[in-house]
Image: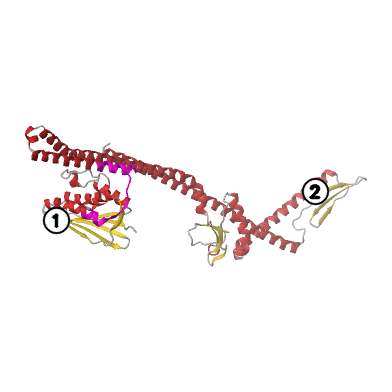
Amino acid sequence: MKKSTIWILTAVMACAFVGLLAVQIMYMENMVKMRNEQFAEMVMRSLYGVSTMLEQNETKYYLDQDLKEAEATYGPQVGTMSFPSTQFDPYGEDTTAVAAGDIKIQRPANFNTLKNLNDSYQNRQEILRGQYLYQKSLLNEVILTILSQSSDRPIAERADSTTVSEYLKSEFENNGLRLPFEFAVVSRNSGIVYKTAQYKPESQNEVYTQVLFPNDPLNKQNYLSVTFPTKSDYIFNSIKFLIPSFAFTFILLFVFLYTIFLAFKQKKLSEIKNDFINNMTHEFKTPISSISIAAQMLNDDSVRKSPAMLKHVSTVINDETKRLRFQVEKVLQMSMFDRKNATMRLEDEDANAIIHSVINTFKLKVEKYGGQIVAQLDADDPIVNVDKMHFTNVVFNLLDNAIKYRREDVPLQLTVTTRNPDDDTLEVIIADNGIGIKREDLKKIFEKFYRVSTGNRHDVKGFGLGLAYVHKMITLFNGTIRADSEPGKGSKFIITLPLFK
C-alpha cells in the first residue's frame, strides 16, 4: 500500500471520528439542557405549590380570627341556622315553630297545614338570605384585613421554617424530586430571615426563587430560595447511559490509531527490507565477482605455473571468502539474538587488552587512509564480565564505522579511551573526526537495518546491522551505549560497563 493511500484513509477516518464525537457531544449537551429544564420546571411547580399553601394558611388564619371576634360579640350561635319543623297533636291542632336565632313564631292551630308549610318555606329563605349576606360581609372583612394587615405580620409567623420545610418536602416528592435540598426565606429589605445550615447561595449550586405572598406591597415582599447540593449528581445519573457510547468510541479510536501506526510501521519495514536487499546485493556482489575472477585465473596455465601469482590469487579468494563469511555471520547472529537462541560465554576479561589487540589490527588500515589512531587506555581496573568474541566485534564495528564515514578533506583521527569514572564502572570512548551524524538520526542509529543517508546512497557498503549488533551486545553485557555527534565535526560513542567484583 502506498503511503499516500494510508494518509488518505487516515484523513477520512479522522474526519469520521471527529464527526461522530461532535454528534455525541451535541446530543449529550442537549440531554443535559433538557434535564436541567425539566428539573427547573419541577422545582418551580413545587415552589408555586408551597406559596399557594402558605396563602391558604394565611386566609384560614384570618377567617379563624374573624370568627373568634364574632363569637365574642354575638355569642357562640352566630351564623348557625335552624330549619322549620311541623308538629301535629292528636287533638286536631298543629303547631308550626320557626327558629331564627332567638326568634320563635307561633301560629294558631286553626291554620291549615298547606299555609303553614308555605310560610315556613318563606321564613327559611329569609334566614338563608340573611346568613349568606352575613357570610359575604364576613369574607369581605377578611379579604380587606388580609390586604391591609397581612403584610405587617412577621414573615417568620406567616411562613415558619418547620411548615415551609414540610411543604417543600411534600411538593418535591409529589413532583418526583427525592434529593436533599437547602432553603432560605429572604426579605426584600432585610436580607435572609432564616435559612437551613447548609444553604450557600454563593456556591456553584443554582438557586431557585419563588415570591411568597405575591399580593404584598413590593417593598414588603419576601422570597423562598432553594438550592440542591447534589443536583449535578442527579443530572449526571440521568445521562450516564451515554458513557458507554463514548467509551466504545474511544476504544475504536485507539484501535484505529494503533492500526494506522502498524500500517506505517509495516510500510517502513517494507522499505527497510527493500533497502536491506539492495545493500546485501551490493555487499555480496564485489566479493563474489572477485572470487569468480580468481577462479577464472586459476584455469590459466601461466598463473598456475607462477608461484607468486598463484599465491596472490589464493590470498584474494581467501580474503573475499572471509569477507562473505563475516557478513553472513553478522546477519545470522542478529537473527539468533532476536529469537534468543544464541549462547553467550561470559568470562572475566581485560578490556584494555582486547581493545589494544583490535587497535593493532586497525593501525595499518587507518594509516592506509593517511590517518592515525591514538590509544589512551588509562583505566586502572579494566576487568569486565563479557563474551570476548562479541566484545571484540563491538570494538571492531565501531572502529570500522569510523573509517567508513571519514571525511575526505581532513586526515582521519581516531581516539580510543578507557577510564574508571567511579569504582564500579568502566567507560570506553571511541571518537573520530568523521562526517558526523544528524540529530534526527542519532535516535535511530541503533535500530536494526537503519542507515543514515550516506549509506543509502551505497557509497558505503553495509546492511544497517553493525550498530544494532553493538547495542544488542552491550545490553546483554548489562551495559549502556550512547552516541554524541555533530555533522562535520565527528562522532563519539561512549560505552559503560559494570566492573567485575
Q: Which of marks 1 and 2 precedes in the sequence?
A: 2
Compared across the picture, whether 126 is left or right of 436 comes to right
Label 2 to label 1: alpha-carbon separation: 147 Å
Q: Which residue is found at the position 56% from the left and 53% from the top?
A: 179
Q: Position of residue 326 (x, y in %)?
A: 22, 43
User: Which residue is at the front of the view, 365 or 104?
Assistant: 365
Left/right of residue 192 with respect to residue 500 in the rendered view: right
Callout 2: SS: helix
Residue at the disc numbered 1 = 372
Q: In this view, which residue lies farthest toward the right?
A: 91
* Identity, as a three-letter code, of the amino acid under mark 1: Gln
Q: Dominant secondary structure of the magenta stretch?
A: helix
Q: Quadrant of the C terminus?
A: bottom left
Secondary-structure class at tag 1: strand
Residue 354 rendering spot, x and y as whole percentages: 24, 54
Is residue 323 rendered to the left or right of residue 307?
right
- Label of residue 166 in the image: none
Assess whether residue 196 is covered by the magenta stretch: no
| Labels 2, 1: front one | 1
Number of residues whose C-alpha sits closer than 10 Å to that of mark 1, classed few (under 14), some (14–19) or many (20 or more): some
Residue at 23%, 62% (x, y): give it.
378
Residue found at x 91% / y 45%: 92
The image's mark for residue 120 is 2
Can the viewer see residue 214 in this picture? no
Quarter the N terminus occupies: top left
Counting other residues with Cα less than 10 Å from the Cα at mark 2, is it few (<14), some (14-19), or many (20 or more)? many
Residue interval drawn in magenta: 329-356
